[in-house]
């Protein structure tokens, strides 16, 4: 430095004497605590700071200022003093990191003039996307493979090689035989940025032929052993597996799937199924890889999922840009037993969250005209509750999101409580539940958050139902869901939870029971030649109207490009909407030991409610679905 003094030189000389230098092996990660909070140069034990002073690279005033900040920070002395010194705006941090590397015996490497092309063709081709993401976050550049006295190793360059646990973190990423060296930050950043740019371009080209896998390649590559645990690790790093994974996500989105199922089957193959229009369909079976290798690739590419954890359930997420749209994926990993019951394996289900599928126009829900009018009336009331009921996968969330999108304006405060948040709705404050925030805690806090409209994901127990009912009865429009088969049974469910009948009667405006029914493909459907009349009678068709209806069959196994030979294309909701009229409220209030679901249903039908069976029947008459699909959906679970 330009400025120095005899006092500083004397202090540095004194600190550098053997009798005043610290003992030990000079670990970069374990700082020594100060004996006092008052700065005394002779008390310094940080060898990096001592070297900086001795080389006249910093002033004693800088060290004193760093010391004062260091000892005052909560837990400040848990890291070395020289790191606090590097934060000083008057000091070039590169100088501090370079001297730390020298003190802790890290070799130096220059990346200037190093061509990333050589890296991408060699070592870079063996590094997975997830490993590269980890290296970028650490700002570590794997620059080359080098022969040493102990064999081949990967040279890793970073501006801060003395970081605590850096070696362990790199090993968790899958790198094994490595040597960490110091390089200037500007060189490391430049190298990483250039590699990222080129990798992105190469991936775009490779993505065009993602389904052309080369899974027969050898895994006995000596260079790969530098950072592979074993043969399984080598298989994980094969680009074909990554291409298969990326192709799975892309194809699932393009086919309109809601879920992707990935699991090892009884033949020790990896099987991939897509849930399209509610039905699981086999998409790909791969027998040329270890199932665990592909499962590990999926876990590696999922945020918040630990590849090495195989004994507990895990939840994570993935985000990709597919066909110019940002798609989110929710990942669920579940341990399962394999066919031999000896080795632990795993099943992975990926839920596809495509914001383009959020319905904002209520008419696109497929509600009958009378049901739509009742629904629109209910969601525009200033207070009260609207309940959506049905089994898992019946489209309740889709209908709720459509309702919220319809009523949200800058004049109302809309809050939701969800586990998890599936779709982001503009202008809505969405609360995500976690192990630190329970549903009960969130609802109690929402009461103090000045809400106008509240959506409660599901009323699971009496406490949740009590709070939701309280919201509805205290001037808030409230949306929630239940798991029941029809609209009247939802009232009985709340009663059995312990909610008083008069609270139920005057809190609820409308109950909507819902199912999703597949629509027959309009391009390949064929008129049905014969249908059992007894079956039609059971489904509510009158004998006198049969000659006026054209029934259709789904053409399965054909070559139709629209439905891919399935016979069905898309789904729509069938519903029964039960508004709480004065007569229905009175019947609920007068209930004593139990709610009479059948009587409630008869009264609602008398007042104009269309049942689930009526809604499905109308679709069959309109030629939109089949008798088989109506029978499957309406009577499943009844």
Image: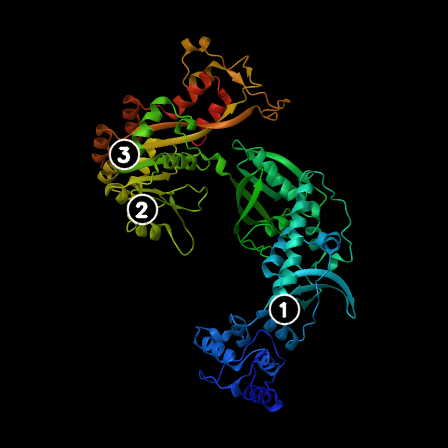
User: Is tag 2's residue or tag 3's residue first in the polypeptide sequence?
Assistant: 3
For disc 1, the marked residue is: 161
| Direction from residue 389 to residue 381 in the image, left or right | left
SS under mark 1: loop
User: Residue 77, how many percent across, how many down?
Assistant: 49, 76
Towards the viewer: 534 or 72: 72
For disc 2, the marked residue is: 462
Between the residue at mark 2 and the residue at mark 1, the CA separation in whole angstroms equals: 55 Å
Picture quadrant of residue 29: bottom right
SS under mark 3: loop
Between the residue at mark 3 and the residue at mark 1, the CA separation in whole angstroms equals: 62 Å
Q: In this orientation, does residue 190 appear?
A: yes
Image coloring type: rainbow
User: Residue 39, how many percent across, how many down?
Assistant: 47, 84
Q: In this orientation, does residue 539 appear?
A: no
518 is higher (above) or lower (below) than 423: above
In front: mark 2 or mark 3?
Answer: 3
User: Residue 531, how many percent across, how many down?
Assistant: 51, 15
Badge 1 crowding class, 10 Å Cα cut-off, few under 14, some 14 to 19, many 20 or more, is many
Towards the viewer: 81 or 382: 81
Q: Are marks 2 and 3 in contact (CB under 8 Å)?
A: no
- Locate the N terminus by quadrant: bottom right
User: Residue 133, how many percent across, how many down?
Assistant: 61, 54
| Direction from residue 159 to residue 60 in the image, left or right | left
For disc 3, the marked residue is: 381
User: Is tag 3's residue or tag 1's residue first in the polypeptide sequence?
Assistant: 1
Badge 3 crowding class, 10 Å Cα cut-off, few under 14, some 14 to 19, many 20 or more, is some
């Amino acid at each position: 430095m330009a400025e120095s003094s005899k006092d500083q030189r004397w202090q540095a000389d004194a600190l550098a004497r053997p009798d005043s230098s610290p003992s030990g092996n000079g670990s970069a990660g374990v700082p020594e605590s100060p004996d006092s909070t008052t700065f005394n140069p002779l008390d310094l034990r940080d060898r990096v700071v001592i070297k900086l002073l001795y080389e006249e690279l910093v002033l004693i005033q800088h060290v004193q200022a760093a010391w004062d900040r260091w000892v005052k920070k909560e837990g400040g002395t848990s890291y070395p003093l020289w790191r606090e010194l590097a934060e000083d705006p008057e000091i070039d941090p590169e100088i501090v990191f370079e001297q730390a590397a020298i003190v802790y015996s890290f070799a130096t490497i220059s990346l200037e003039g190093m061509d990333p092309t050589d890296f991408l063709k060699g070592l870079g081709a063996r590094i997975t996307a997830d490993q590269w993401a980890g290296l970028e976050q650490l700002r570590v550049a794997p620059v080359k493979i080098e022969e040493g006295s102990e064999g081949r190793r990967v040279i890793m360059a970073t501006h801060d090689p003395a970081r605590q646990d850096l070696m362990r973190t790199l090993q968790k990423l899958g790198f094994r035989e490595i040597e960490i060296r110091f390089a200037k930050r500007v060189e490391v950043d430049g190298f990483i940025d250039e590699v990222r740019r080129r990798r992105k371009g190469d991936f775009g080209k490779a993505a065009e032929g993602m389904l052309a896998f080369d899974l027969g390649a050898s895994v006995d590559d000596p260079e790969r052993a530098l950072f592979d645990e074993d043969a399984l690790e080598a298989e994980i790093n094969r680009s074909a597996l990554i291409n298969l994974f990326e192709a799975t996500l892309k194809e699932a989105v393009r086919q309109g799937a809601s879920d992707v199922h990935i699991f090892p089957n009884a033949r020790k193959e990896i099987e991939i199924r897509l849930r399209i229009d509610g039905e699981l369909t086999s998409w790909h079976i791969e027998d040329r890889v270890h199932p665990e290798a592909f499962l590990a690739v999926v876990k590696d590419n999922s945020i918040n999922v630990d590849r090495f954890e195989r004994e507990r359930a895990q939840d994570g997420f993935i985000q990709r840009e597919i066909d110019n749209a940002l798609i989110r994926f929710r990942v669920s990993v579940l341990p399962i037993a394999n066919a031999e019951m000896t080795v632990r394996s795993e099943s992975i289900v990926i839920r596809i969250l495509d914001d383009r599928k959020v319905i904002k126009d209520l008419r696109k829900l497929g509600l009958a005209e009378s049901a739509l009018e009742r629904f629109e009336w209910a969601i525009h009331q200033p207070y009260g509750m609207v309940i959506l009921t049905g089994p898992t996968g019946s489209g309740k969330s889709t209908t709720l999101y459509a309702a919220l999108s319809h009523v949200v304006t800058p004049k109302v405060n809309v809050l939701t409580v969800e586990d998890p948040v599936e779709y982001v709705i503009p202008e809505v404050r969405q609360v995500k539940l976690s192990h630190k925030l329970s549903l009960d805690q969130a609802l109690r806090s929402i009461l103090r958050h000045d809400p106008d409209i509240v959506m409660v994901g599901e009323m699971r127990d009496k406490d949740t139902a009590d709070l939701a009912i309280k919201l509805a009865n205290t001037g808030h429009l409230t949306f929630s869901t239940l798991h029941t088969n029809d609209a009247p049974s939802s009232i009985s469910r709340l009663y059995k939870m312990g909610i008083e009948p008069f609270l139920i009667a005057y809190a609820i405006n409308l109950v909507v029971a819902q199912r999703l029914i597949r629509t027959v493909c309009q391009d390949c459907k064929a008129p049905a030649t014969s249908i059992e009349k007894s079956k039609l009678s059971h489904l509510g068709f009158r004998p006198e109207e049969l000659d006026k209806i054209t029934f259709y069959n789904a053409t399965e196994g054909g070559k139709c490009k629209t439905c891919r030979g399935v016979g069905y294309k898309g789904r729509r909701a069938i519903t029964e909407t039960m508004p709480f009229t004065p007569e229905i409220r009175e019947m609920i209030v007068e209930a004593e030991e139990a709610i009479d679901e059948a009587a409630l249903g008869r009264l609602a039908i008398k007042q104009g409610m269309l049942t689930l069976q009526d809604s499905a029947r109308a679709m069959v008459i309109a030629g939109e679905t089949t008798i088989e699909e109506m029978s499957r959906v309406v009577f499943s679970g009844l």
